[in-house]
Image (cartoon, rainbow, N blue to C red):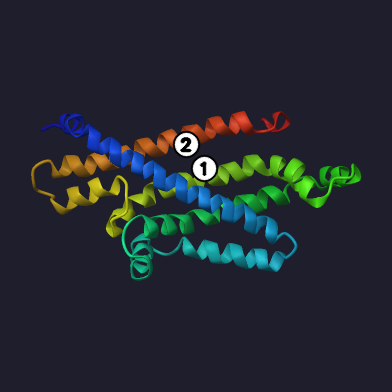
Amino acid sequence: MSFLDYVVENSERILFLLLQHVQVVLLAVAIATVISVAVAIGTEASQRFRSATLSVTATILTIPSFALFGLMIPIFGLGVMPTVLALTMYAIFPILRNTVTGLETVDANVVDAARGMGMGAAERLRRVSLPLAWPVILNGIRVATIMVVAIAAIGAAVRGPGLGELIFRGLSRMGGANALNEALSGVVAIVIVAAVLDLVFLITGKLTTPRGLHA
């Protein structure tokens, strides 16, 4: 059976796993975004604590994905929970780094002008700092998402949802009928998911970036 014939014959299963993959990735990135933005804002007054947080989250990226997923099993068991937690941990650093960078590059004169207009700290953050830092923050979310799309395939090692199931099953049966097609369908689907999400973020950036910040 050719690869295209295999995809057509198993399209429902592939689509189901693809949707699972997208859901688990977006859930992890959403959680990581909330945590990262909150930490970036909360550590603004303490550069030492902010630097320590960045160092810790950066170190997490050096942990091999198989090892991190494996470490989750004794605590959280198998399935969705360890997959989402591991992906969230990987996604935090790019988003946190860009959020910190975005907030730090906001023009101090603009913030002072907002203060002079009588805006409180929370209002300045909501109406001035975050909107101006948004393009940088969004790029961090974009990078984290594309990275996590690939790592999510390893979630199959802990029986997590997504396209990794196709890859692992295909590799485990290598030499058998359609084993290569099965593994390849998972890889191709992941590449497509990454490309589509990347395009979505590019369009979102153009639509949500304040007009004066467009290049």
User: Which element carries disc 1, helix, strand or loop?
Assistant: helix
| Residue type (three-letter) at the residue carrying disc 2 | Asp
| Residue type (three-letter) at the residue carrying disc 1 | Arg
Which residue is labeled 2 in the image?
198
Q: Quadrant of residue 155?
A: bottom left
Percent of width and height locating residue 72: 37, 66
Q: Is residue 188 visible?
A: no
Circle 2 packing at 10 Å, graded few (<14), some (14-19), many (20+), is some
User: Which element carries disc 2, helix, strand or loop?
Assistant: helix
Q: Residue at x 73, y 30 (%)?
A: 212
Q: Is residue 79 above or below residue 139?
A: below
Percent of width and height locating residue 95: 56, 51
Which residue is labeled 1 in the image?
142
Circle 1 packing at 10 Å, graded few (<14), some (14-19), many (20+), is many
Percent of width and height locating residue 75: 38, 69
Quarter of the picture holding the C terminus: top right
Are discs 1 and 2 less than 8 Å apart at CB?
A: yes
Q: Residue at x 62, y 52 (%)?
A: 37
Q: Residue at x 53, y 55 (%)?
A: 92
